[in-house]
Image (cartoon, helix red, strand yellow):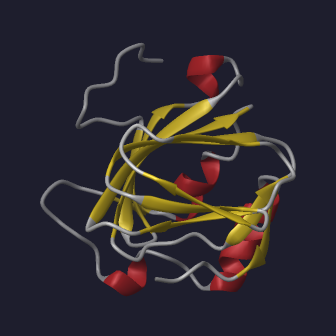
Amino acid sequence: WREVVGPAEGLADVWWKTGRLKLKADAGATGGGFSQVEVVDPLGTATPLHLHHDAEETFHILEGEVTLVVGDQKHELGVGGFALIPRGVPHAYLVRSDVARMLVTFSPSGFERVFADIGVPASDGQEPPPDSVFPPMDEVVRAFARYGCEILGPPPTL
């Protein structure tokens, strides 16, 4: 495993939803303790409302603005904002700025494998066609379930 991953690097680099995701730490590097991904998403990108049965998830906003829906509450996070979502708590996010860049951590690791399973491998200078970035929702639901994540509802919108 690698102890240092540069700013433009990742152990995996995939197009995911409408943005790009770079895996910075995985189960192999952390002994299963946690995984971390850098997510770069454009305006309007959102996750479906979901919960993780087996992992906590954190969000640390590095650039941009995100609305984080946690249970029945909404939280507006900007640069430096941080949130910890305990396992079993429904949540989703929505990008409210032109772009948002954030570090997302899962503890313990495991869920990060879904991104490589259903994401599209990225290569610098190229973007895949939009319809190749995210599989049909029924496939997403099945893939998330394999990693202990349950989709509960649609994503928030602007």
Q: Residue furthest top?
A: 3
Whether residue 63 sits left or right of residue 151 in the image: it is left
Residue 145, above or below 89:
below
In terms of depth relative to the viewer, which is nearer, 134 or 84? 84
Work out whether 150 lies above or below 158. above
- Would you identify the image quadrant in which residue 139 lies? bottom right
The residue drawn where x is 87% and y is 52% is 88
Identified at 56% across, 20% down, the residue is 29
Residue occupying the point 71% across, 32% down: 107
Report x, y in % for residue 74.
63, 64
Residue at (52, 83) in percent of width and height: 157
In the image, 84 versus 87, the foreground residue is 84
Q: Is residue 114 left or right of residue 125?
A: right
Residue 39, image x, y percentages: 41, 51
Q: Quadrant of residue 155?
A: bottom right
- Specify the quadrant of the image occupied by residue 32: top right
Task: Estimate the x, y position of residue 140 in percent, counting from the top left.
Answer: 66, 74
103 shown above or below 28: below
**Where does residue 134 sit, x and y in percent of width and height?**
49, 76
